[in-house]
Amino acid sequence: MIDGLRVLALVPARGGSKGVPRKNIRDLGGKPLIAWTIEAALASRYIDDVVLSSDDAEIIETAVAWGASAPFVRPAELATDSADSLSVVRHALRALPTTYDVLVLLQPTSPLRSTADIDGAIGTCLQAGAAACVSICEVEKSPFWMMEVQGNGRLSRLLADKPLPTRRQDAPPSYTLNGAVYVARCSDLLAGNGFLGDDTVPWIMPKERSFDIDTEFDLKYLRFYLSEGQNG
C-alpha cells in the first residue's frame, strides 16, 4: 500500500509461446524464469498482492510454489497469440474479489528488473499525479539516423520532419519501452484506457536490467550473462 492506495501486481504468463516454448518456467540461473519476477514483486514496499494470470496448470503450480497467488484461470480466448495485454489486465481486475487502486503489470520476460525499479515506477507515477508510468531504457542507436524503404525502393529518414544533427553526439537521448514495469490506476484501466498516453511518465532503467526475453537466443545470452557475473 502507498498513500492509502492498494496496489496489485499482476504477472501475465500464458502457456503457449512460439518464440521460446514453455519460457515462463524455463530455468534461468537455477530457478524458473517466472520466479525472478515473483520474488522482485514480493519484496516490494508498496505491493499488497502478487497475482498470476495464466491458463496453464504447470505455470500456475510453479508460480504458487514461488509465492504468487492464482485465484483464477485465464480464459482460453485470452491466452492466444492475438490476445492483448490490456484485455488480460481487465479480466483480472474483474475476476478478483478484492478491489485495488493501482495495478503494476510485471511481465516474466523481464527477469532482471529489480524491486527498486518496481517501487520507483509506482512512486514516480503517484508523486507526479500521472495516469500511468512505464519503464524505458535509452537506445544505443539514435532514430535520427534510422531509415525506411519507400514504395519506390528509395530510402528516406524515419524522422524526416526533424533536422539531422551535425554529429551523433548532438542527437537528444532517445528511449524505448523495455517491457519491465507498467503502472496505472485500476479505474483508468477498467474505463478502457491503457498504459501509454499524454499523461504517462517514465521510469528510466539501465540497459543491464532491461533484458527482454523473446527468443531462444535471448534466453541463452542471458544465461551466459548471469554465469559470467557469478564467475567474476
Image: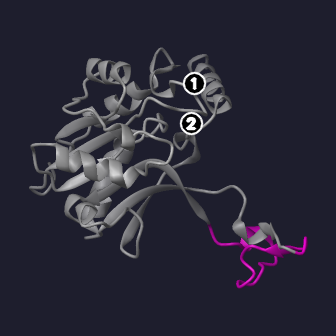
Front position in the image: 204 or 198: 198
Q: Which residues are magenta?
A: 152-173
Residue sitting at 27 percent across and 61 percent down? 189
| Residue 18: % across, % down | 58, 33
Circle count: 2
Quarter of the picture containing the C terminus is top right
Q: Which mark is residue 226?
A: 1
For the residue marked with disc 1, what is the amino acid?
A: Leu
For the residue marked with disc 2, what is the amino acid?
A: Ile
Earlier sequence position, callout 1 versus callout 2: 2
Residue sitting at 21 percent across and 49 percent down? 93
Q: Main secondary structure of the magenta part?
A: loop
Up/down of 32 relative to 138, above or below = above
| Residue 109: % across, % down | 49, 36
Query: Which picture quadrant has residue 66?
Result: top left
Give the residue pinned by disc 2. Answer: 213
Q: Nearer the viewer, mark 1 or mark 2?
A: 2
SS assignment at label 1: helix
Residue sitting at 61 percent across and 65 percent down? 174
SS assignment at label 2: loop
Mark 1 residue crowding within 10 angstroms, few (<14) / some (14–19) / many (20+): few
